[in-house]
Image (spheres, rainbow, N blue to C red):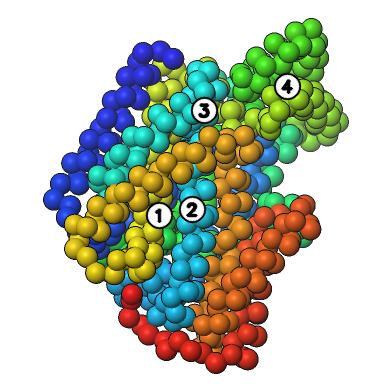
Amino acid sequence: MHWINWAVVIGYLTYVVSDSIRRARGLTTIEGYFLANRSLPWWAVGLTVMATQLSAITMIGTTGQGAVDGMKFVQFYFGLPVAMVILGVTIVPYLHKAKVYTAYEFLEGRFGPRTRSLTALLFLCSRGLSCGTIIAAPAVVFSAIFGWPMIYSVALIGIPTVLYVVIGGVQAVTWADVKQMFVIVTALIAVVIVLLVKIPVSPDAALTVAGAAGRLQVFDFSFDLTKTYTFWSGIIGGTFLMLSYFGTDQSQVQRYLTARSVDEARSSHLMSAFWKIPLQALILLVGVLVFVYYLFVTPPMMWNPAHARAVQAADPSGFVQLEREANAAWNLRARLANEVARTPRGDAATVRANFRTADSAYGAIRTDALKKAQQVIGSSTRDVNYIIPQFVLNELPIGLAGLFIAAVIAAAMSAVAGELSSLSTSTVIDFYRRWVKPEASDSHYLAVSRGATAAWGLVACVVAIYAASLGSLIEVVNKFGSFFYGSILGVFILAMIPRSRAAGAFFGMIISLVAVGFVSWSYPTVSFLWYNVVAVVTAVASGLAISAFSRDVHRPSTQPH
């Protein structure tokens, strides 16, 4: 990579880290470390909520998803506005007024310590796994493009991130997130402009070709449980997932607990409700335009250079033959793409059909190449995560490539910092202070909090080394969460039903986890988005049934513990 790109990356990261450390001066209490003394403005809280989602996973995984599958992924977020409105009148005001540190403190007041501890444990499991996946996203860039081992790439991202969150706390994380949002959106718009300039057909023709390839299809109204992204999975399964994530997951609850008031906490949620879907559409559009670009510019047969090197070393003649077949198929597809771009829409039915056939044939050859790579290296070779890194470093102008990479790395650092802060908060408040040392000074808890942050950082780095081989990173994160989110949301719903009891909440959560495990094991083709629906319905139904036959031995309390 050109030294100017490196200068942009290093300069920006230095600014972000140094500013975060500067904001940590005078930090002496755990309320300041975990909640910024509940003093942040609504717009900063709203931006940090969005920046957590617009992380490096979004920049790499979602754009790659757009290149492969088109705009369908945006349906995943259709339930977000619905969820945000519901949360604004239910959980958000209650938790903010309760002056708790974690969402799970509230559950002890309602259902006792064992329900609180189990729920917090589920959060730690799901968030610890997804935190590692967030680190993996930028590590993919360095590992694939520069040929570095994944462990070194992960260390490059993970170590400085852990250092600055250990020092800075949630206030440093929040203001870093604000910077990330502006840099990420600027980088995305710049990439769209570059793509529209470099694609050798008009923007209208480019979209026509994308539509002919099925990349602009947004809505899928089929009620097919095996399809991950449909209107119904998004509006139903997505609503349950978003309710759980934004309403009960500590990584998001901690965000709105830092707001100055209930109204400002609500406003921060509504910001995400209004702007998330348009931003997600922009990110997917980048991927779609990258797909169109490589219809006219020869792409690599395999996006991950390590896969190509492995196949070439193991079978040189077979690799050459695959390249010949891929080049021939690409040339035919490129010729037909040009025909689609030039043919009036009313006369293009036959041309479009021929183009789709050629596109499928090229995709089949790529699939064969990836299967050969999988046989050689012995692990998954789905390379959707490598599409955008290749385009950025090989096709973007000097300086802009550095800005995009800086945005990817810094976004990852910011998102991981927020995750580590929430993991540390739950570890210290829900477990250490609750069960190990209930009475101690703030300086003691602050030291333990920083140690917990460092420990979770190490766990995340270990997970990151393996996460990049699991497929689309954005799907990996949501799959991790979907095994736990619905069960946690079910308990919070039970907490708002007066007749539910402690035994019902505790065992209802366990039964719902078993139900999700059964569905994922027995029906592996069912989309993970439906896991959240299964878990919530099971938790609430079984919890109420058990409550009807149990005597509540816990006296409800509204005081945090």
Label 4 to label 1, Cα distance in Å? Answer: 38 Å
Give amino acid for label 2.
Arg
Which quadrant holds residue 167? top left
Which quarter of the rendering shows the N terminus? top left
Specify which label sits upstream in the sequence, 4 or 1: 4
Q: Nearer the viewer, residue 362 or 422?
A: 422
Mark 3 near mark 1, Cβ–Cβ under 8 Å? no
- Going from N to C along the chain, the mark reached first, 4 or 2, is 2
The residue under label 3 is which amino acid type? Met
Give how far across and how far down residue 397 sits, in percent: 44, 17
Calculate the distance from the C-alpha at mark 2 to the C-alpha at mark 1: 7 Å
The image shows residue 321 at horizontal and vertical percentages of: 80, 10
Find out whether the residues at labels 2 and 1 contact each other: C-beta distance under 8 Å.
yes
On screen, residue 14 versus residue 271, left or right, reads left
Q: Residues within 10 Å of mark 3 (few under 14, many from 20)?
A: many
Q: Is residue 503 left or right of residue 557?
A: right
Residue that badge 2 annotates: 127
**Callout 1 crowding tier (Cα within 10 Å): few <14, some 14–19, many ≥20:** many
- C-alpha distance separating marks 4 and 3: 18 Å
Disc marking residue 150:
3
| Mark seen at residue 376 | 4
